[in-house]
Image: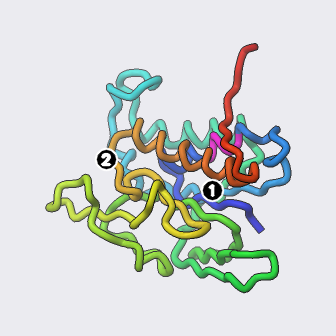
Amino acid sequence: MFDVLIIGGGVSGVSCALVLGSAQNKFFVSDKKIGIFTHQKASSLQEALFNNAYGIPTGTLGSDLLPQSLSHLSTSYPNIIQIPEEKVIKIESDSASPSGLEFKVFTNKSTYTARNLVVGIGSANTFAIEGLMQFVEPHQKALPEKQRIQLRNTDHKVSEGIYVIGTLAGWRSQLAIAAGSGAAVATDILTLWNNGIQTHAHDSIR
């Protein structure tokens, strides 16, 4: 049983995982099981070149940044379980579980259970995760001719236990925006685990 599963190993998904991982020593996180599906073949970063992203050296290729980000995650926060080369195809919810709302996540290779889901796999209209299709709507901040989609949400929340991040949440396609979206949801989840007390995860040299 995962306490949270992140679907998507791009900018927003890894950003969410990094913030959750960095909170590992907080008393309300130490017993949490966190995973991320790192399937990246369809990431828009595969063809990206970055000259205008905060903290990223000019000329960085997205195709290099993708594996670097996963290496950063595994080195700094090995408590985050990376699930590579699996594509999520279906989600089922179970509100009758004795322990509360749970989700079954079906991939092309296996099945997982989780209490919370974070979905960040881009806004292409090829989105086809069964169990989430009822939330699909036209992207509100993309050109109509691009036929982008988003998941209907309120402040990243799709429904109880399900969050959406990055361009799939309706944000514009900018690395800094996607990263911030993932980090924002991470702090929402940390706040949830902290019994609703607002929180975040910062490191300091002091």
Residue 84 x/y as whole percent: 61, 58
Nearest to N terminus: mark 2 or mark 1: 1
Q: Secondary structure at mark 1?
A: strand
Quarter occupied by the N terminus: bottom right
Asked if residue 42 is positioned above or below residue 159 in the image, the reply reads above
Which picture quadrant has residue 71? top right
Residue under the image location 47 percent in, 45 percent down: 181
At a point 81% along the width and 48% down the height, the residue shown is 28
User: Counting other residues with Cα less than 10 Å from the Cα at mark 2, is it few (<14), some (14-19), or many (20 or more)?
Assistant: some
- Circle 1 residues within 10 Å: few <14, some 14–19, many ≥20: many
Name the disc covering residue 36, or none.
1
In the rendered image, residue 17, in percent from the top left (x then y), is placed at 62, 47
Q: Is residue 122 magenta?
A: no
Q: Amino acid at mark 2?
A: Arg
Q: Nearer the viewer, residue 132 or 47?
A: 132
Q: How far is the residue under mark 2 from the one under mark 1?
A: 23 Å
The number of callouts visible is 2
Whole-percent x and y of residue 122?
40, 57
| Residue 138 image position (x, y, % from top left) | 27, 66
The relative height of residue 4 versus residue 159 in the rendered view (above or below) is above
Q: Nearer the viewer, residue 205 or 60?
A: 205
Helix, strand or loop under label 2: loop
Q: Residue at x 41, y 36 (%)?
A: 176
**Amino acid of disc 1:** Ile
Q: Which mark is residue 66?
A: none
Q: Residue furthest left?
A: 145
What residue does disc 2 label?
172
Q: Which residues are magenta?
A: 17-21
In what quadrant of the picture does the C terminus appear? top right
Q: Residue at x 23, y 54 (%)?
A: 142
